[in-house]
Amino acid sequence: MFYREAGQFKASYIEDSAIFPLRQDRIGIAVILAVAFAVVPFVATPYLFSAILIPFLILALAAIGLNILTGYCGQLSLGSAAFMAIGAFASYNFMLRVPGMPILVAFAGGGLIAAAVGILFGLPSLRIRGFYLAVATLAAQFFIVWCLSKVGWFSNYSSSGVITAQEINILGYVFDTPVEKYMLVLTIVAVMALAAKNLARSNIGRSWMAVRDMDVAAEVIGIRPMRTKLLAFAISSFYCGVAGALFAYAYLGTVEPEAYNLDLSFRILFMIIIGGVGTVLGSFLGSAFIALLPVFLSVFVEVLGSTLGLDVSKSLTSNLELMVFGGLIILFLIVEPHGLARLWQIVKEKLRLWPFPH
Amino acid sequence: MTFFLEVLISGLLSGIMYSLVALGFVLIYKASGVFNFAQGAMVFFAALTFVGVMELGLSPWLAFPVTLVVMIVLGLVTERFVLRPLVNQPQITLFMATIGLSFFIEGLAQMTWGAEVRGLDIGLEDLPIQWLSDRFGMSISKFDLAAAGIAAILVATLALFFNRTRIGRALRAVADDHQAALAVGIPLQQIWGIVWGVAGFVALVAGLLWGARNGVQFALTFVALKALPVLILGGFESIPGAIVGGLIVGASEKLAEVYLGPSVGGGIEGWFPYILALLFLLVRPEGLFGEKIIRRI
């Protein structure tokens, strides 16, 4: 009843190929964007911005990047954090070495450099498949992070290896409070998410999905596997690179290789698995889940400890969190292997028929 | 020349230690098609349990069977509660589940036994062999040699088990084709339980050796990351591949560290095996002994 396409006629090709063909979807997206842009900045606390909302948005962007590669094109990658690191360091060096560099251009430049490296590390995907490729992408993860911490030029010969990021200054306006940073991140993420959604339904997106579903068959019907796969690596790395630059500039405030370790790569992979492989919506849902889970867990463990009257030590808490985190991931995969995005689909189906059962 | 040989041999011996961990991966991948990322966590759990049981006052000879029982129970529980509900899911889902499992096991291990670093003495000293250093001026660790010997015994036992016993044959049948194995009456779930039990046993042996060498600490879980290049170099499905891959990775890593490392600033052992394996895969996409995948529409 609430979610029906009845009565919405498409009279032209333009209407038929709209990103959100249903009126309900358009209204829903508009409401979400309006709330995110116009309501959240006035109600949320600085803690909420800097500890939850900003990392949630940035990691969602990285998850979209990985989703393009893994979800749409079917190439499992365990090195997304390394491409984020490249984006961060490239942006830093653009800002440092090019006088008068606008920061948004530096972010885009960081993304482009990451895309170039992504193509390089994507080359093996033309020969290697499946888990062999996944392990091979670990080469990117370890090699790139090692390179960034060993080669002094990248970090401007900083002795500690931890560099303070330059301030974010767009046309003379300095973004330094959490709210301002949030608005900047939100704008970039919203634009890039819409672009990704659009890309997925284009000619390129469809050829990615063909390669994912069966690459030999895709080749036979005339999709060039090399171009398609490398494009997926490039665009995915671009997204990861921009996310990495934002991670350094808007979240951490520092540029350091250690922030982009294997753990972050795994977390991004968890996001797309839990959120839903091959959906843009899933990247956001998964990122929200992974960002909020530790917060809930620590509160939960604290409450549990105080009700039982136990003296909960720090190490016990962190180990218990680790166990619950691992257990929840397994449980999630068992209960809903297609991710949170699939749950949303089911809800939509129900809303369509409500209040009738069939 | 002596120095080169010394580096080469110690590299080969430490490569066997990698093979031990890679073996656990291969066993499970062969029988169930699961890429078990939790193998490193299982190694850590085994070593920590062994030390913990010994601290309770048991002798090493008693602690070993106790730990073995714990590992087998862990394997069976994993099969029952993680893998059985996930049958027929795509491989990536199973892989993610084992990453979740590795978090769980790491947390469980540290919660049960504490997180401090412990030493583990299994009666092998990490000293150079006197005879070799007198005669040839090479220092080869006694410990490494013994570890290699244990690994060789383990592989031989596994080979016998796989080729000569009834259960072993059933395991190989399952590895070849799940459905055909089911059709001739091989109980699939029982077989998977056994495989996870055996993998627990291999993890225990690897955990004892690695723990005795580096101390029982959280860093043991990273041993799994060392085993992955070995795995893709040798091929996911091959036990000889794990051994040969381990030897190649161990030797080339040590040689690169000694001869190449100083010129690029050191610390290359973290990525060198991966790049090596990657370049190697460009020539042979399914590793040295992996099954050739025939792709048709």
Image (cartoon, coloured by chain):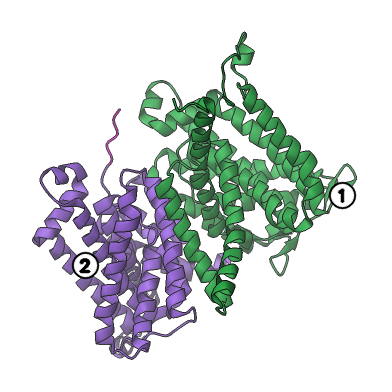
Chain colours: A green, B purple
Give the quadrant of the N terminus of chain A: top right
Q: Which residue matches tag 1?
A: A174
Q: Nearer the viewer, residue A89 or A331?
A: A331
| Mark 2 Cα-neighbour bin, 10 Å: few <14, some 14–19, many ≥20 | some
Q: Nearer the viewer, residue A335 or B171?
A: A335
Q: Secondary structure at mark 2?
A: helix
| Residue A7: quarter of image | top right
Of discs 1 and 2, which sits in the foreground? 1
| Mark 1 Cα-neighbour bin, 10 Å: few <14, some 14–19, many ≥20 | few
Query: Which kind of residue does numbered mark 2 sit on?
Result: Val
Q: Nearer the viewer, residue A277 or A219?
A: A277
- In the image, taking residue A9 as reference, residue B128 lies left or right, namely left
Q: Are marks 1 and 2 on the same chain?
A: no
Q: Residue at x 21, y 61 (%)?
A: B194
The magenta segment is B293-297
Position of residue B223 relative to residue A190, above or below, is below
Question: Residue A167 location in percent, x, y?
Answer: 82, 53
Q: Is residue A237 magenta?
A: no
Q: Which mark is residue A112?
A: none
Is residue A254 visible to the viewer in this orientation of the structure? yes
| Residue B170: quarter of image | bottom left
Question: Residue A100 location in percent, x, y?
Answer: 85, 45
Specify the subunit that label 1 lies on: A
Q: Which residue matches tag 2?
A: B155
